[in-house]
Amino acid sequence: MDEMNPLVPVAMQIIVHAGEARTRANEALDALSEKDFETAKAKMEEAHREITLAHQSQTEVIQREAAGEKIDGGVLFSHAQDTLMTVMSEVNLSDRLVQLFEAFFGQV
């Protein structure tokens, strides 16, 4: 039996943390729809913590490769990177929505 690709656990960590970030961002938007700005901001802080953990895992792999280690990525790692980048965009957009909604509706 082949030895497991060492990137599999890293890819799974990226996917798990990115997924948690997406969930927290969606919870922030749910709170935003209720004009609960404090909860929305707290959920966005959680989203940022999770996306940072995912990004750190990816960065470690990139640094290893930059240092000369041969990295065989595979489809799962590509999926993890795609998930991370997509969720990073979602988190950034959610941040802006929280800011904009609070600016427009926070004064009511």
Image: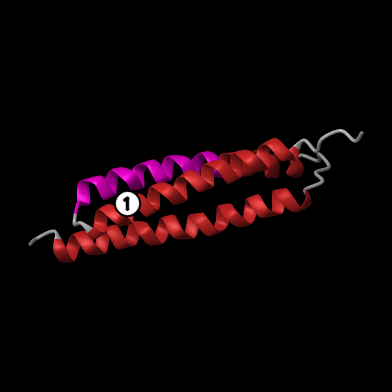
Q: Quadrant of the C terminus?
A: bottom left
Question: Where is residue 25 drawn, in percent x and y?
Answer: 39, 52
Horizontal side of 77 relative to 57 (left or right) equals: right
Q: Is residue 42 magenta?
A: yes
The secondary structure type at the circle numbered 1 is: helix
The residue at the point 82 percent across, 35 percent down is 4
* Magenta region: 36-55
Q: Which residue is mark 1?
A: 28
- Examine the rendered structure and indicate whether residue 11 appears above or below residue 99: above
Residue 59 in view, yes or no: no
Tell me where residue 93 sits by quadrant. Answer: bottom left
Q: Nearer the viewer, residue 75 or 51?
A: 75
Quadrant of the drawing holding the N terminus = top right
Residue 76 position, x and y percent, is 72, 49
- As rendered, which of 16 and 49 lies closer to the eye? 16
Rendered residue at 69%/45% (across/down): 62
Instruction: Give the residue at x 21% y 51%.
Output: 37
In the rendering, at what x and y percent does residue 45 appear?
A: 35, 43
